[in-house]
């Protein structure tokens, strides 16, 4: 059973075609855990992916957009993104959040 120290995991830009998030990742065979960091004004353009994803806010506020709605979440709140549902985000503050995403075909947060 592997153990991890997030202090030892290098930060990387994981999806530059969709998002400005810098992330530290732990990837298993079925699930991936990421600590994401954004600066205020950054975010993710509208996109969809086959993986289910949960984002839990640690610091700052994030505006989450789906087709036809917008919601702001902050520390202690979370969003559940269903597979293949278009969504996007804009950071209202500097943000740090936890993202848990399913792994499909070996892919989680990182692109193919």
Image (cartoon, rainbow, N blue to C red):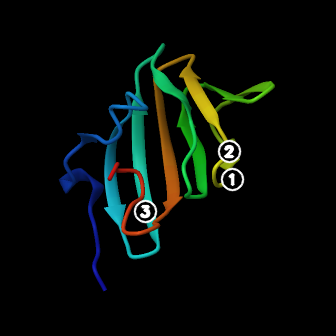
Q: Which mark is residue 39?
A: none
Q: Read off the residue under disc 3.
A: 32
Q: Which mark is residue 85?
A: 2
Q: Is residue 36 above or below residue 102?
A: above
Residue 30, position in %: x, y?
46, 74
Residue 112 as seen in the image, left or right of residue 103 = left
Residue 53, position in %: x, y?
58, 53
Q: Secondary structure at mark 2?
A: loop
| Cα–Cα span, label 1 and label 3 | 16 Å
Q: Is residue 53 above or below residue 28?
A: above
The residue lying at 69 percent from left, 41 percent from top is 77
| Cα–Cα span, label 2 and label 3 | 19 Å
The residue lying at 38 percent from left, 33 percent from top is 21
Residue neighbourhood size for the residue with mark 1, other residues' Cα within 10 Å, grouped as few (<14), some (14–19), many (≥20): some
Chain-order first, disc 2 or disc 3: 3
Front of the two marks 1 and 3: 1
Chain-order first, disc 1 or disc 3: 3
Q: Which mark is residue 82?
A: 1
The residue lying at 60 percent from left, 58 percent from top is 52
Front of the two marks 1 and 2: 2
Residue 81 as seen in the image, left or right of residue 40 = right
Residue neighbourhood size for the residue with mark 2, other residues' Cα within 10 Å, grouped as few (<14), some (14–19), many (≥20): some
Q: Quadrant of the N terminus?
A: bottom left
Q: Secondary structure at mark 3?
A: strand
Contact check, label 1 and label 2, Cβ < 8 Å = yes
């Amino acid at each position: 059973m592997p153990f991890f120290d997030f202090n030892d995991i290098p930060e990387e830009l994981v999806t530059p075609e969709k998002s400005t998030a810098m992330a530290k990742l732990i990837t298993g065979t079925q699930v991936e855990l990421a600590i994401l960091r954004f600066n205020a004004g950054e975010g993710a353009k509208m996109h969809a992916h086959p993986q289910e994803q949960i984002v839990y806010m640690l610091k700052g506020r994030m505006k989450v957009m789906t087709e036809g709605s917008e919601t702001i979440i902050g520390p202690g709140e979370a969003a559940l993104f269903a597979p293949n549902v278009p969504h996007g985000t804009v950071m209202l503050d500097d943000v740090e959040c936890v993202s848990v995403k399913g792994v499909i075909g070996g892919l989680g947060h990182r692109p193919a």
